[in-house]
Image (tube, grey):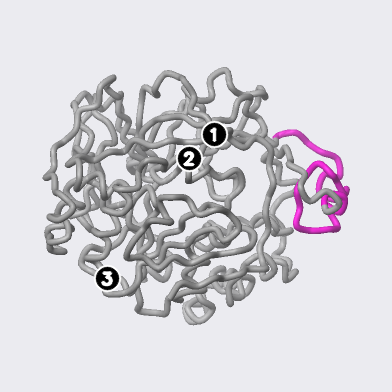
Amino acid sequence: MPQSVTLKKGFNIKLSGKAVLKLADSPRAETFAVKISGFHGISRPKVLVQEGENVKAGTPVFIDKKNPDVLYTSPVSGEVVEIRRGEKRALKEVIILGDKKIEYEVFQKHSISEIINLSKEDVTRQLLSSGVWPVITQRPFGIIANPSETPKSIFISGFDSHPLAPDYDFIFKGDDKYFQTGIEILKKFTDGTIHLNIDGNSEVIQMFAHAKDVQINKFHGPHPSGNVGIQIHHLDPINKGEIVWTITPFGVIQMGKLFLEGIYDASKKVALVGPEVKNPQYYQTYTGSSIRTFVKDNVKTDNPRYISGNVLTGERVEEEGHMRYHDHMITVIEEGDKHKAFGWVLPSINKPSFHRALGLLAFLFPKKEYNVDSNMNGEPRAFVQTGVFEKVLPMDILPTYLIKAILADDFDEIEALGIYELIEEDLALCEFVDVSKHEIQAILREGLDLIHYS
């Protein structure tokens, strides 16, 4: 039965530089990358290609030796120009120089009626061999879903509440049939409910309004209302031993395209946003795109920070860097490498803050949009227990005690305090409001790995 959930806890960070609903007329990016950082849970990657080798869109690039059935494939056709490694030769990314005209590995096409009659095994096989399977994330732990396990339910968040998030109606326009086909495929993996959660404060986009065989739930309230982890908590909480799958609308659409068109189509629209962008707008590209083409001559500051994703959970990249697997936005802010006298103490109208003592004047202008930089206004210090985490996390979880339990490696407390319901993005606001300047998301991942691999 559809539900309506109203969240009172949370905080909206209003930044300037939202993308206008316009597709830029610009050259396509030249290089694309399949990055390890886009996936959690890959512990033993094995590269399947060599530098100088030509690949097609859908050609396997690497696997995880612990789960070799899941293939990670190239988003475009072209030449493998670099296999980039880090410390101890750990794989970081495989970079491909894209062809002007994309060639695709060919997979079996199906009509809608054929898809309905396909077995779970047939569907799984095609998703694995094409490289589309990694669009499915498994909770707990936020890792790539295990094909041999069955989730009790599947969740799709139909909106993004992060700062400057892209407009889903714009980036998914015209993909209705692929989305519905993807739902037909997902139905084969669970006897439970497929939840499609939408923003209760906005008009429902056509693709979601016409969706069948899903339970449409409405969420009202500030960020993190768009986080799928928050939605799971309020609709179908995860207990120890239970599994829930999550997938983005883009992932559902990719599934539909794979079975209807017989190709791994990684084309997407991405938003270039942020206070330091001259012309915030959308670009047509492919998964793992280089950001250089988008940001060249389109940035105000001489000292920018480029972020693949949003300011709360995104990954810092260089101008020659590439986007992560799941990201639909690039955010540009100013690098915070300038000293500000009493920057962390003085009340200011020019910086967003959840704490009234620091951003008192900002509360008088609730609709004001801010220009921000990466300055932390202080260094990590003793863990101060303020109770503020609980004010921005709309879950029946005590994040302060959970983080302390992780730091103490207390297995029993970590489990008892609800770690199975969380991944990094769910505590990103806690990191933003933390007066102690700790990397809360990184600490949480340490706790998740501690439980997962122990």
Q: Is residue 445 magenta?
A: no
Identify which amino acid the numbered label 1 is placed on: Leu
| Viewer-closest of 287 and 316 | 287
Left or right of residue 430, residue 326 in this image: left
Q: Nearer the viewer, mark 2 or mark 3?
A: 2
Left or right of residue 201, residue 418 in this image: left
Instruction: Residue 185 in the image: state x and y as whole percent.
Output: 24, 58
Task: Find out whether the residues at labels 2 and 3 contact each other: C-beta distance under 8 Å.
Answer: no
Identify which amino acid the numbered label 2 is placed on: Phe
Secondary element at image label 2: helix
What residue does disc 2 label?
Answer: 170
Position above or below: 198 against 282: below
Instruction: Residue 148 in the image: state x and y as whole percent.
Output: 20, 67
Marks 2 and 3 sit apart, C-alpha to C-alpha, by 30 Å
Residue at 26%, 53% in the rendered image: 181
Residue at 42%, 62% in the rendered image: 196
Structural crowding at the residue carrying mark 1, measured as other residues with C-alpha within 10 Å and reported as few (<14), some (14–19) or many (≥20): some
Tell which circle, 1 or 3, labels the residue nearer the N-terminal end: 1
